[in-house]
Every structure is written in structure tokens, then in C-alpha cells.
Amino acid sequence: MFEILDCPVDLVVPAGQHPHCLVAQIPDNLRRSDAGYVVSDPAAQWELVRSVLETASGESRFAKLNLLVLPEGCLPLVHLDDMLAFLGARFRPSTVTMFGLEHVALRTYRELLERHRDDNPRALERVRQDLAAGGGEEVPVNLCCIAVKEQSGRLRVFLQAKGHPFHGEEFLDKSQDLYQGQHVYFFRGQPSFNFMVLVCLDYLYRDLYSSNIQQIVDHADRLYFASRQTLDALFVIQCNPKPEHQAYRGILSGFYGEYLADTPGVRDTVTVFGNCSGESAVEGSPPETRFGCSSAVIGSRHRLPHVATSEFRTDDLGGAPLYRLRFGTETRLCYFNLPLYHERDPRSTRIPLKVHGIMRRAPGGGWAKLTGEEIQRGRIQG
């Protein structure tokens, strides 16, 4: 079971202003290697990721952007320094970028933690303990990076490893099994914007004795009773071929209180799932693979109207105590705001979560915004 590490960051989201989030639902193209799953064409993938960064940092429509979400496994390790240099030089202050890297060896993960030891001291200590206890240096690691461009302009780099693999990351030979992550960060911004980031199945993993999600709920509840602060947002980055799996409904229902538990620390949390697009290709994936369907979920104290278009729709996952904004499977940039605290604006007529724009790949490169007519043209009936 992972350790939750509290981490204050100089991230300013003005009181009364909606945090704005951009989910980049772009393709992952991964192949198997001795190190696990790696990007098939690093140069082409970096060009795609860089185009997202250019758009997010260069267009005035994203002047209020606070949070950029890219998929699990989307960045080649060879371009990590390029990514961090771009974020440090070009992104606005008080911006968080979260993204997954291709699999790396455990020794490489340790080296990355050592390079960014000022931001990851406890994480580095845990990895060193695992290696000293006999953990192999060649064990593959699925990791994500949370890059925080603080209000002062300083770029902080946080790393955490996925804790629970899917079947394609487990082998009869123990030395090839995915490394089990030992920590997850609980970020605390100013004046009060608290968030966490998980890697895909870490959201779902639970057993009879312990549960990642229950651990997060309990941590947020303790924060609420101590300071009246809450977990404002939970981000789950994915390369998920079954984004509509029934298991997600069960976990979300429990998270938002269906099981008769009063959870004040998370009842206003918005949960954002950022998946790769339907154009993804992962070696070894079954024929029924279906990527896409990034989404944002809020509790039943908020309310979303029923909407169904070609690009997004809303639902309640078949009667769960929540509302969901779900996007399609195409390669898209989805820009929307997160809701404010319910207590700040409890009007029943206010729509708490709004789509500000959806962008598609432009023929000549870059990204072009879809018009309202294009979105409505493929309207889904019912």
C-alpha cells in the first residue's frame, strides 16, 4: 500500500476563480521491450507532445490554464529534459503539467529521483530501501511526472511510480514484473487548492484489507476535520483499453458516498480521467481494445444537465451518485473548468462544469478549435 506524502506547492488559484483544465487525449504508440512498454517512434511522439505544449502556452484562449493532463506512457524518456525545459521556459506561473513516461528500469527511476532529489527526498529514500532489500535494478517502472511551475516561476519536478500493473505487465519471471510504487503525492496549493495524481489502475486497486482509494478518502477527511480543507481534484492518467469498465462505476460510487459513508474531504472532489485516444496502438492489446473516453466526474451535490453531442455527453453511470462529462475517442484537446466549492455558489441553476473548447489536429500541423456547429452537427439522440 502506498504512502501519501503531503507536499505544499506555491500554486496560486485565486479565490472565486474556476481552475481550468486541458486534457490532451492524444495517441500512445507503444511496443514491448526488455524494459517494458516503450514509445515506438520517439521523435514523432515528441513532435506531437510538443505541439500540445506550443498550443497550451502560445494561445490566448489558454491564458487561464492551470492544469494540463497528458496520458500515461506518452513521453519518451529521451525527451524528458526537453519537456521540462519547455515547461520551465514557456509555461505560465501556477501551472501544473502531469504526464506519463514510457517504462524505464528501476535504476533509471532512481537516477531521475536523485536528479530531482530536492522535490522527492522521501520517494528516493523508499526506492533506495527497495534496492537494498534485493530489488533488481532492471525491474521495469511505469512512472508519471507532475511538473509544477510555481507562482515564483520555479519549476518543481515530482515523480511517482505506478503501484498496480495490468496483466500485460506481470510475468512468470518475477524479475520482469512491474515495480510497485511506494508513494503518491498530496499537493497543497494556495490559498486552498489541493490535488492528487494517480496512474491508471492505482485508482482501482483494492483488496480485503486495504484500498488505495479508501486511504485517499481517509487522508482527505482528516484534512477536512483539521483545517476544513478538502481534496479539490483527483487526476488519473491512463493508457486504458477499457475506459468504460464496470469496475470504475463501483469505485466512483463508493468514492462519492453511495455506501452510506459521509466523506466531507472528497464529496466536492472532481475526478478527471485523462486517457489516450482511439488512434493508439499498444503491442499485444486484444482486438476489442477501445481507448479514449476521457472524462470528468463530480458528486451529486453538483448537477449537470443531460447533453449528448458528437464530441461529449453527460450521464450518471446508470444511477450512481455522481455526474459525468465524458468525451469521445478521437484525438482531441478538451478544455473545461473545474467546479468551485459548492458552498461558494450553491445556486441550483448554476452549471458547475463547462466545456470551453475542443480542438482537433489541423491538417498542416498544430490544433484547430471545433466550432459549435461542428460539435452539434453529430448530435446523439436520446
Image (spheres, rainbow, N blue to C red):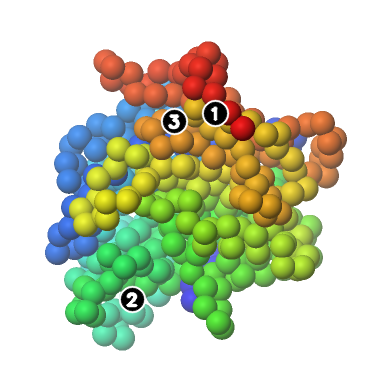
Q: Mark 2 = which residue?
A: 128
Q: Where's residue 70, x and y in %?
A: 40, 42
Query: Does the image show residue 208?
Result: yes
Identify the mark nearer the N-term, 3 or 2: 2
Which class describes the residues within 10 Å of circle 3: few (<14), some (14-19), or many (20+)?
many
Q: Nearer the viewer, residue 378 or 214?
A: 378
The residue type indicated by label 1 comes to Ile
The structure residue drawn at horizontal position 72% and vertical position 62%, both measured from the top left corner, is 257
Q: Which mark is residue 333?
A: 3
Image vertical order of residue 134 relative to residue 70, above or below: below
Identify the mark nearer the N-term, 1 or 2: 2
Image vertical order of residue 138 relative to residue 319, above or below: below
Q: Nearer the viewer, residue 305 or 370?
A: 305
The structure residue drawn at horizontal position 36% and vertical position 47%, both measured from the top left corner, is 290
Determine the secondary structure under disc 2: helix
The structure residue drawn at horizontal position 40% and vertical position 69%, both measured from the top left corner, is 164
The residue type indicated by label 3 comes to Leu
